[in-house]
């Protein structure tokens, strides 16, 4: 398959799942999140967008979170990145991905052992849903929402102004 088509596919239970192209507002929020995380990233970590993360080997589960923070010392540096190297996965919800981003992906990321998951809803003003640390063998705790500012110490020190994530 050509590269453009591959960028629009995730693998779910060994089968290709086609994703709609993200909209303008979605991509602006992804960019602002990347910048906010990049400014606070401790040594030994990297933040990226558009990278495949292998959550499971069999049946193959390969997702592409909108933004991820991961340890640089991970295995090999070859794609796809393994879930055990990711410390934070973030999804920006689009109209075409509401149920997948709200239900499927949190369960999949927790089962794969990604310790932190955030979901950013666009709406009339951005709202960040922060899920509690993944429990071993279980899911995330109930999410807590933030619509003004989010300040945390895990997975590293961060503060995000929700209004700064919107289209300028």
Image (cartoon, rainbow, N blue to C red):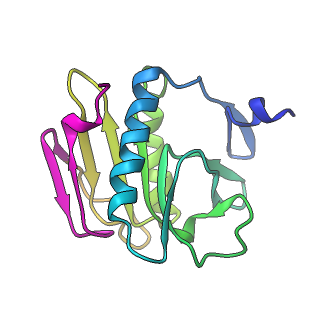
Q: Quadrant of the N terminus?
A: top right
Residue 157 is a magenta residue: yes
The part of the image, by quadrant, that contains residue 50 is top right
Question: In the rendered image, which quarter contains the C terminus?
Answer: top left
Which residue: 25% across, 42% down?
A: 128
Q: From the viewer's perspective, is residue 115 above or below residue 6?
A: below
Q: Residue at x 48, y 77 (%)?
A: 44
Q: Position of residue 164 (x, y in %)?
A: 24, 37
Is residue 142 in view? yes
Q: Where residue 22 sits: x, y (%)?
A: 52, 25
Residue nearer the viewer, 73 or 39: 39
Highlighted magenta segment, given as a residue range? 145-168
Measured as percent of width and height from the top left, residue 143 is found at 24, 50
Left or right, residue 82 beside residue 59: left
Q: Residue furthest left?
A: 148
Residue 157, relative to residue 106: is it above or below?
below
Q: Outermost residue toward the right?
A: 1
* Rendered view: 30 above or below 151: above
Quarter of image, res 81: bottom right
Q: Nearer the viewer, residue 88 or 137?
A: 88
Instruction: Locate residue 89 relative to residue 168 in the image: left or right.
Output: right
| Magenta run includes residue 87 | no
**Depth order, front residue of 101/79:** 79
Query: Residue 5, relative to residue 130: is it above or below?
Result: above
The x and y percentages for residue 121 are 30, 33
């Amino acid at each position: 398959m050509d590269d453009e088509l591959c960028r629009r596919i995730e693998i779910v239970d060994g089968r290709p799942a086609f994703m709609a192209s993200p909209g303008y507002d979605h991509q602006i929020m992804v960019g602002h999140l990347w910048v906010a995380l990049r400014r606070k990233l401790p040594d030994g970590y990297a933040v990226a967008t558009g990278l495949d993360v292998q959550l499971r080997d069999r049946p193959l589960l390969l997702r592409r979170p909108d933004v991820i923070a991961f340890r640089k010392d991970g295995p090999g540096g070859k794609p796809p990145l393994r879930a055990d190297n990711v410390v934070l996965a973030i999804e920006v919800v689009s109209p075409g991905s509401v149920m997948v981003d709200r239900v499927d992906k949190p369960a999949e990321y927790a089962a794969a052992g990604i310790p932190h998951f955030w979901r950013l809803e666009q709406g009339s003003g951005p709202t960040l849903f922060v899920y509690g640390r993944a429990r071993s063998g279980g899911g995330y705790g109930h999410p807590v929402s933030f619509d003004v500012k989010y300040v945390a110490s895990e997975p590293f020190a961060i503060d995000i102004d929700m209004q700064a994530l919107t289209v300028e």
